[in-house]
Image (tube, helix red, strand yellow):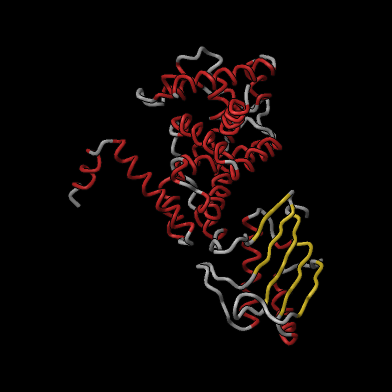
């Protein structure tokens, strides 16, 4: 087989769901970067699409939408970053006080800390984890005086044993009015 | 309510309704990418029941199927900007997301116990007969002899791996791989 045939066969196996973990991941990377491979995948999806329509429509339980709504409270961001990513079971996130509609809460330290931690919780839950999975947090503050209230709010979101933590005071954050950011690492399902 | 609206809708050709639904879904994905959460609900109301059905054929359990749909909607919300209408239908994209999630759960949970009756009940011919007579895929699958064509249905619809296919069809792994290869080649030749 030439390269074109090999790519076409890989695209077919990818759409069929027959690639193993490593091959599947490689195909997903190519799908994002290689237009001719993406084209082959689209063609296979279109060929096999009628099989999807043979699935019986099965009503989901009423609670499912609420769970999805809760897990998608953060708006997608207009910047080249994700609020959170997972890799090999490790969860990485950098969070600020952004509201579900994408607007920024420029309130006081209590409000911003609370919303930042709420966002952390939503991202973890969306990744299948909980606050108990958090291993390390770095808190960035723009004013030393905010540490006390930040600590008060922080303590209400975590159980003992607390995550490891560093707190850093910096001159400013990029988003105007933002006075706190948290960078978090978690091992989903480790506990 | 006179019911007139319903009657008018029923008189529309099915493919026209499909095209309308496709356009609505593509527009809803664009709105998701712009951060409009009501658009995610539009997609959910239209497609969640079918997506649960698709996941259930792979996972055989309602709770696991709903888990796959839950994960799929989070990915749809976060990845909506990645949908490109020039590269395929919105529905195909949505269903690919839920199939990927269901396959991933299926692999992680090492399902298909020998005693799993629901897997034994899988009937490939019944699936084929649910496709419209006019379906090119159905016509082309029917030209492939059984059990070679079964590998397409068992893998695509029920998420079986090469190993699971070999076990179910009681043939060596190499034979299964060759059947998959030849069946896909035949489908491409037949459908273009």
Q: Residue at x 52, y 54 (%)?
A: B77
- Which one is nearer the viewer's eye here, B97 or A66? B97
Question: Residue B24 in the image: x percent, y percent?
Answer: 37, 49
Please determine whether, in this image, residue A85 is positioned above or below residue A145. above
Q: Residue at x 48, y 62 (%)?
A: B35
Residue A186 picture quarter = bottom right
Horizontal side of B163 relative to B133 (left or right) equals: right
Horizontal side of B81 relative to B42 (left or right) equals: right
- Which one is nearer the viewer's eye here, B35 or A59? B35
Q: Residue at x 55, y 41 (%)?
A: A35
Q: Quadrant of the N terminus of chain A?
A: top right
Whether residue A74 can be seen here: no
Residue A148 picture quarter = bottom right
Question: Residue B180 in the image: x percent, y percent?
Answer: 59, 21
Horizontal side of B56 relative to A113 (left or right) equals: left
Horizontal side of A6 relative to B26 (left or right) equals: right
Q: Residue furthest bottom?
A: A145
Q: Quadrant of the C terminus of chain A?
A: bottom right
Residue A79 picture quarter = bottom right
Question: Residue A136 in the image: x percent, y percent?
Answer: 78, 65
Please determine whether, in this image, residue B109 is positioned above or below residue B125. below
Question: Residue A162 in the image: x percent, y percent?
Answer: 80, 68
């Amino acid at each position: 087989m030439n390269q074109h045939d090999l790519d076409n066969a890989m695209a077919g196996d990818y759409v069929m769901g027959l690639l193993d973990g490593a091959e599947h991941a490689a195909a997903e990377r190519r799908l994002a970067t290689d237009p001719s491979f993406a084209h082959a995948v689209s063609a296979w999806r279109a060929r096999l699409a009628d099989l999807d329509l043979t699935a019986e429509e099965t009503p989901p339980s009423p609670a499912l939408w609420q769970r999805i709504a809760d897990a998608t409270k953060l708006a997608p961001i207009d910047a080249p970053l994700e609020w959170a990513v997972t890799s090999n079971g490790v969860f990485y996130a950098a969070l600020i006080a952004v509201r579900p509609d994408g607007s920024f809460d420029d309130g006081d330290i209590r409000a911003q800390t609370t919303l930042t931690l709420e966002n952390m919780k939503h991202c973890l839950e969306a990744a299948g984890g909980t606050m108990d999975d958090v291993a390390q947090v770095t808190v960035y503050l723009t004013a030393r005086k905010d540490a006390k209230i930040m600590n008060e709010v922080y303590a209400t979101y975590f159980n003992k044993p607390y995550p490891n933590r560093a707190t850093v005071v910096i001159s400013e954050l990029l988003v105007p009015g933002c006075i706190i950011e948290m960078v978090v690492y978690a091992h989903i399902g480790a506990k | 309510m006179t019911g007139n609206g319903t009657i008018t809708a029923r008189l529309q050709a099915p493919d026209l309704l499909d095209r309308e639904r496709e356009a609505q879904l593509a527009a809803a994905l664009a709105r998701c990418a712009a951060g409009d959460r009501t658009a995610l609900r539009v997609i959910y109301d239209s497609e969640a029941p079918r997506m649960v059905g698709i996941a259930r054929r792979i996972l055989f359990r309602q709770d696991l199927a709903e888990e796959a749909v839950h994960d799929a909607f989070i990915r749809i919300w976060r990845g909506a900007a990645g949908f490109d209408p020039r590269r395929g239908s919105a529905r195909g994209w949505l269903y690919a997301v839920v199939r990927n999630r269901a396959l991933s759960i299926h692999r992680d949970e090492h399902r298909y116990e020998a005693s799993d009756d629901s897997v034994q009940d899988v009937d490939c011919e019944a699936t084929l007969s649910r496709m419209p007579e006019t379906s090119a895929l159905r016509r082309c699958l029917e030209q492939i002899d059984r059990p070679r064509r079964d590998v397409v249905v068992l893998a695509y619809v029920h998420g079986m791996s090469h190993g699971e296919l070999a076990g179910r069809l009681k043939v060596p792994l190499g034979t299964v791989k060759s059947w998959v290869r030849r069946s896909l080649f035949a489908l491409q030749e037949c459908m273009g």
